[in-house]
Amino acid sequence: MGSALSRRRMLGSLAGGALLLGTATAPRSHAAPRSHAAPRSHAAPRSHAAPGRRLPDPGIITATDPALLSAVEAASLLHAGQLHPRELLDACLARTREFDGAIGAWIRLYPEFAYAGADEAGERLAQARNDGTPAPDVCGLPIALKDLFAVSGLPLTASSRVLEGNIAAGNSGVWSKLEDAGAVLMGHAHTDEFAIGVATPQVGNPWNTDMSPGGSSGGSAAVLAARFAPLAVGSDTGGSVRLPASVCGISSIKPTYGRITSHGMIPLTWTRDHVGPMGRSLADASLMMSILATVDADDPITALGPPVPAGGYPLTAKGGSTPLAGVRLGLPPSELPPPLQTLFDDTIQVARSLGAQIVPVVMPPTPTSLVTGDVVEMGSYHRQFADRIGLYRPERVPSVGTAVASLAVPVVDYLMLERDRLRYQVDYNRLFVDSDLDAVLIPGTRVDGAQREEFLGVSVTEGVMGDVKWANYSGAPVVTLPVGRSSATGMPFGVQLGARPWQDERIIEIGLELQEALPAWRDVPDLVPSAGTAPEVAQVAPGPGPDPTNTLDAAAPLRTPPMNAIR
């Protein structure tokens, strides 16, 4: 621990402070939809630990319904040849079709595309067993993508009538990596329209379908909570994977800004958008993080961080009586409803029992000027839809109109706002150095259940449902994990653990220890049969582009790498 403390007490160093301007590369030609008649050729696999050492022993897995398997459990059985990807997909689709009517987590399903992918994954896993060379951990696992991530030849609508009929022109970087690793795309999950809001009102929380699953990645979180798929991808601009994870009882990782490519993703605000792996457990999300947190030539910021750890991000807790001995957790003040405060206080006591030291801290205030920058970036993308303003949900029209009007802000003022962002990052990092912290511990939400339409019109930039903006402005990595359910509403509640930029591996390690002691993620909601209504769509010819999203101005013109500097 001494060397770790020494490193922590050293002055932070710049992890990449230059602005990346015009990072979009020349458009690639977009291939036509792949033929399902023959398997794709697969690139040489990246470095992976052998699944037998990394995944749980198949012999200890007791679930009989494949849809109820966690991602790491399903991966173990898939790699051992005890489960075929088609069987797993069958179970996930059957559960979706039986229960999704009242939840509405999916906006579209792609069974034909998915079964083709499952068959290819099955062949790849069989070949890996024969050759003794492990396939990627996610091979054969069904996945939900938030309706922001482009998949060539499939619809991409951001859950909005504004993009009705839009067909992606190419693959997002996220889907390219997952497809190369053998993942199986089940469908797109609903988002709050264009990822702007915190409610995702078209989706019901699986724990109580009258309640909101949070937003904007509410559909992705609902898919996981309902056990419709073992993995999902969301995005986080102002808590958009953390809030849904907390209120749906699942886990998420908001990685360091730029750690995962956002190429081919419909943006909200370029300098705050983070791609977020989501899973039922933190181990599940970490499994997918190892695939996604690699360099993408179409998004140069992804080359600035450290490489993925050898063998991938951690999946298991070290365990023992005091696995968090020597770990210092900063605890900012918080105000919560009594049932949530009880759960949070209990979590603090569990952390102490595991050896953690709890240190009272005060988070640096987020500059109010940054909200203006958020609105300018949003307007830069949405101005292309000015002639379709009436197609937005009514509660979104004022915020979109304001965003487009904000483009009158002088460029020099916008750049000064970016200066304020860098100053905030320095203040955030200084908090960790001055208090000698490993992480901060913060409630996942301030709301003990919300009706589906209770927060209509509220933007993720406002942070009204929880203390979340600090992580998007600092670019810091955060894991969110469930710790229990409210005694008043029965709704799940989770906590956030945040570190300094580029300490993704460390914060996952700490989160795994806490989740091992608080395995609330294993709780499954009781679902009422209600036939799903999401349309089942086949792949068609890709849109004209040039961007994979088949829209304009989706590629970030400016990307600011997060810094570890303190002065």
Image: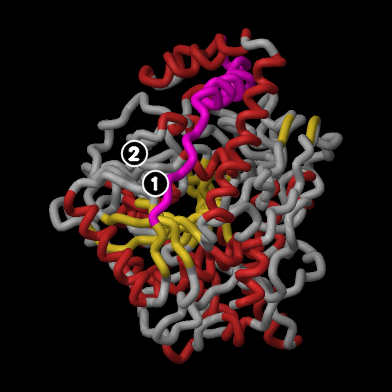
Q: Nearer the viewer, residue 254 or 104?
A: 254
Q: Residues within 10 Å of mark 1 (few under 14, many from 20)?
A: many
The residue at the far right in this view is: 26
Q: Which residue is mark 1?
A: 243
Q: Main secondary structure of the magenta part?
A: helix
Magenta span includes 400: no
SS at badge 2: loop
Mark 1 is on which residue type?
Leu
Q: Is residue 86 left or right of residue 522?
A: right
The residue under the point 40% across, 70% down is 515
Residue 111 visible in the shown view: no
Q: Which residue is mark 2?
A: 465
The residue under the point 56% across, 45% down is 428
Residue 115 visible in the shown view: yes
Q: Nearer the viewer, residue 257 or 325?
A: 325
Magenta span includes 377: yes
Q: Nearer the viewer, residue 263 or 11?
A: 11
The residue under the point 40% across, 75% down is 516
Are the residues at dot 1 and dot 2 in contact (C-beta closer than 8 Å)?
A: yes
Q: Is residue 113 left or right of residue 349?
A: right
Of label 1 and label 2, which has the lower sequence position?
1
The residue under the point 24% across, 40% down is 450
Rendered position, 53 above or below 269: below
SS at badge 1: helix
Give the residues in magenta. 360-386
Q: Quadrant of the N terminus?
A: bottom right
Q: Position of residue 372 (x, y in %)?
A: 54, 20
Q: Quadrant of the C terminus?
A: top right
Q: Is residue 461 left or right of residue 43?
A: left
Q: Position of residue 377 (x, y in %)?
A: 61, 24
Q: Nearer the viewer, residue 29 or 211?
A: 211
Q: Residues within 10 Å of mark 2 (few under 14, many from 20)?
A: many
